[in-house]
Amino acid sequence: MSFEPDVLQGFVQRYLDTVVTGSAQDVAALYAEDATLEDPVGGGEVHIGRQAIAGFYNNVAGVEVKTELLSFRAGGSEAAFVFAITVGGSMRIEPIEVMTFNADGQITSMRAFWGPADITTL
Amino acid sequence: MSFEPDVLQGFVQRYLDTVVTGSAQDVAALYAEDATLEDPVGGGEVHIGRQAIAGFYNNVAGVEVKTELLSFRAGGSEAAFVFAITVGGSMRIEPIEVMTFNADGQITSMRAFWGPADITTL
């Protein structure tokens, strides 16, 4: 199973837009029912299933965020990308993320690579 | 198992340096015996084991390459990074790669995300 690069980039852009404009449930709805989320990678916690994933996004609900796709690479049914997220106008983080997608375009896994060194205080 | 970010970045820099200065065997020696390599991701071929990996790097042996680490993110025992590789002075590719490492610092998997859109002719 494989998507054209511009289709994959559309999935990623939709995700980044929904993080800004949607609720935690809206973001979780972009994920498959049995999806996994690891953010940050190496942090020791993997969120499994759409409900747990909604809980993860609920942690930043109510905080104004902005997102910007900085760099995008397609890979079959996967995508790797660099993006910036500005949280509450005070903190900017630039993770590298890897996402996998199923045939319906749902996110089946999301892994975010970032650490303290990738945070800028604004 | 987890490495400090600067240790992981050292592993990645050693890899990029060895791609420039070393033989295919030298690069393959940075990998674990049972490592896997997928380059590009979605290309349909996964190279399994150090011997197959040496064969992959042998394909570019004899061609002058330069590498440059552009962006690096640590994640426990993994790393994600953007780098540039210039091949024969005529072509520049900027992949996003994800590498995993074992306790000995050997690469256990490498996955490179890039496609035709990420190639620049110089």
Image (cartoon, coloured by chain):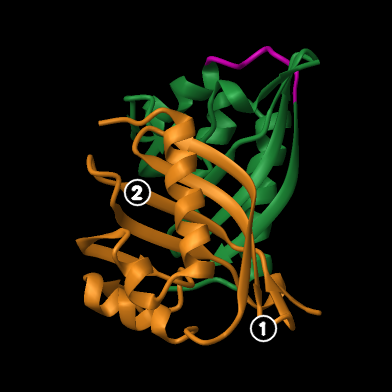
Chain colours: A orange, B green
Amino acid type at circle 1 is Gly
Q: Nearer the viewer, residue B5 or A101?
A: A101
> Label 1: chain?
A
Choose mark 1 or mark 2, whichever is in front: 1
> Label 2: chain?
A
Among numbered discs 1 and 2, the one appearing first in the sequence: 1
Q: Nearer the viewer, residue B115 or A41?
A: B115
Please say whether residue A12 is visible from this viewpoint. Answer: yes
How crowded pointer 1 is (Cα within 10 Å; few <14, some 14-19, many 20+) is rated as some
How crowded pointer 2 is (Cα within 10 Å; few <14, some 14-19, many 20+) is rated as many
**Residue A26 location, x and y as percent?**
35, 69
Q: Judge whether residue B33 is colored magenta.
A: no
Q: Are marks 1 and 2 in contact (CB under 8 Å)?
A: no
In magenta, the rendered stretch is B59-65
Q: Examine the image and state in which quarter residue B72 appears.
A: bottom right
| Residue A100 relative to residue B67: left or right | left
Q: Nearer the viewer, residue B75 or A109?
A: A109
The residue at 25%/31% (across/down) is A1
- Mark identifier at residue A88: 1
Amino acid type at circle 2 is Thr
Looking at the rendered structure, the secondary structure element under dot 2 is: strand
The residue at 50%/68% (across/down) is A21
The residue at 62%/61% (across/down) is B73
Please say whether residue B111 is visible from this viewpoint. Answer: no
> Dot 2 corresponds to which residue?
A100
